[in-house]
Amino acid sequence: MIEAVHLTKRYGAKTAVDGLSFTVRPGKVTGFLGPNGAGKSTTMRLIMGLDAPSAGSVTIGGRPYARLAAPLRTVGCLLDAKAVHGGRTAYRHLAGLAASNGIPRRRVDDVLDLTGLGEVAGERVKGFSLGMAGRLGIAAALLGDPEVLILDEPVNGLDTEGVRWIRNLLKSLAAQGRTVLLSSHLMSETELTADHLIVIGRGRLLADTPVRDFIETNSRARTVVGSPEPERLRDLLLAQGAAVRPGPRGGWCVDGLEAAAIGDLARAHGLAVHELTPVHSSLEEVYTALSRDAAEYRSRQEAAR
Ligand code: ADP
C-alpha cells in the first residue's frame, strides 16, 4: 500500500505537487494520469525517496522509503527505462543489483525468464532497443519480488506484443495481491490495464475512483439511432436540443440525449425506430473532455480577473 497525506513539493515559486492525499491499494492496478507537467513524475520520485517533500508525507507499507529495512524487496520501480549503464551485460547488471541488495542470485534467472530476456542476458545493454531496455528495467524492478511496483510510462518503446505482455504481467502481479501504480499517457492502454485511477492536474487530486466509475460518471450520453424516416427523426432530435451527426449504417449519432428518451420521443411521434444503441465513451474521450473543460474553466477564470 502506498499512502500520500497532504503531499507537497515546491521548487522555488513553483508548486509541482500540491497537498495531494491518496491511497494506492493492493490487489489492483492503479493508473496514474494527468497532463504533462501535472506532477506525476515528481510524485513518483517523492514516493521513491529520490526527492524530499516540502510538506506532508508519503509512505510505502507504512514507512517512508528511506526507512524501509529492505527497499528493493519492498518496492520495485521503473522510473526511466533508459537510465541503465551501457557497458554491462543484462545479466551483470541484474546480478550486481541482486548482490548489493542481499537478493539470491537465482532471482536473476527468474526475472530474465519472466521478462523474456533470457536469450540476450549475455549481451551488453548498450545495444538494447528502448523496448528491451524497458524489459530490463522491469526485470530489475521485480528482482526483489516486491509487494509494491511503481512504473512510469513502462510501455514506451514497446511493440504491440510487448504492450500486451506488460498488460498481462501487471494484471497478474496485481492478482497476486501486489500494489501496482502505473503512469501512462496512453489512455486506451490504461483503460485496458488499470482497475483504479488517480488523476491529478496542476499537482492536485482531480479523481480517485475505479476506472469504470470514472467513465460512467463523466460520459456524455451518446446513442446511435436508425429510422426508416431519418429526416423526420433528425428534426425531432434537433428540436430537443440534441447534437446530431450522420452515424453508422445510415443512422444518426446523437449526443446529449439518452437512448430511452430518444425511444420515447420517436414513439410519441409515431415514428418507427430500427436501431437504438447506447454508445459507451472510452477513457480517452472522457479524459479529453474533462481536461478540455478544466482548461476552459481556467481560461474563463483568468479572463475574468
Ligand atoms: P509530469 O510527470 O506529470 O509531467 P512533473 O512532475 O515532471 O510532471 O512536473 C510537475 C511540475 O514541476 C512541472 O511544472 C515541472 O516543470 C516542475 N518541476 C519538476 N521538477 C522540477 C525541478 N527539479 N525544478 C523545478 N521545477 C520542476
Image (cartoon, helix red, strand yellow):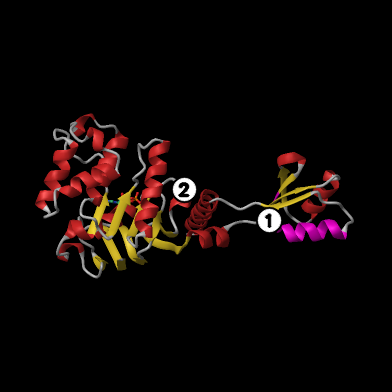
- Front-most of residues 111 and 89: 111
Residue wearing tag 1: 256
Binning the other alpha carbons within 10 Å of mark 2 as few (below 14), some (14 to 19) or many (20 upward) gives some
* Res 197 → quadrant: bottom left
Q: Which mark is residue 213?
A: none
Q: Amino acid at mark 2?
A: Met
Viewer-side label of 1, 2 = 2
Label 1 close to label 2 by CB (< 8 Å)? no
Query: Residue sitting at 81 percent across and 59 percent down?
Result: 265
Q: Residue 281, image x and y in percent?
A: 58, 52
Label located before the other in sequence (1 or 2): 2
| Residue type (three-letter) at the residue carrying disc 1 | Gly
Q: Quadrant of the N terminus?
A: bottom left
**Pointer 1 local density, CA inside 10 Å: few below 14, some 14–19, many at least 20:** some
SS of the residue under disc 2: helix
Does the stretch in magenta take in 276?
Answer: no
> In screen coordinates, is 53 left or right of 163?
left
Residue in view at x 59 percent, y 57 percent:
219
Q: Secondary structure at mark 1?
A: loop
**Magenta segment: does it hold 263?**
yes
* On screen, residue 40 above or below 130: below
Residue 32 image offset from top left, x and y in percent: 39, 55
Residue occupying image coordinates x 20% and y 44% = 109
Q: Is residue 184 visible?
A: no
Magenta region, residue range: 254-268
143 sits to left or right of 304: left
Name the residue beneath numbered marker 2: 187
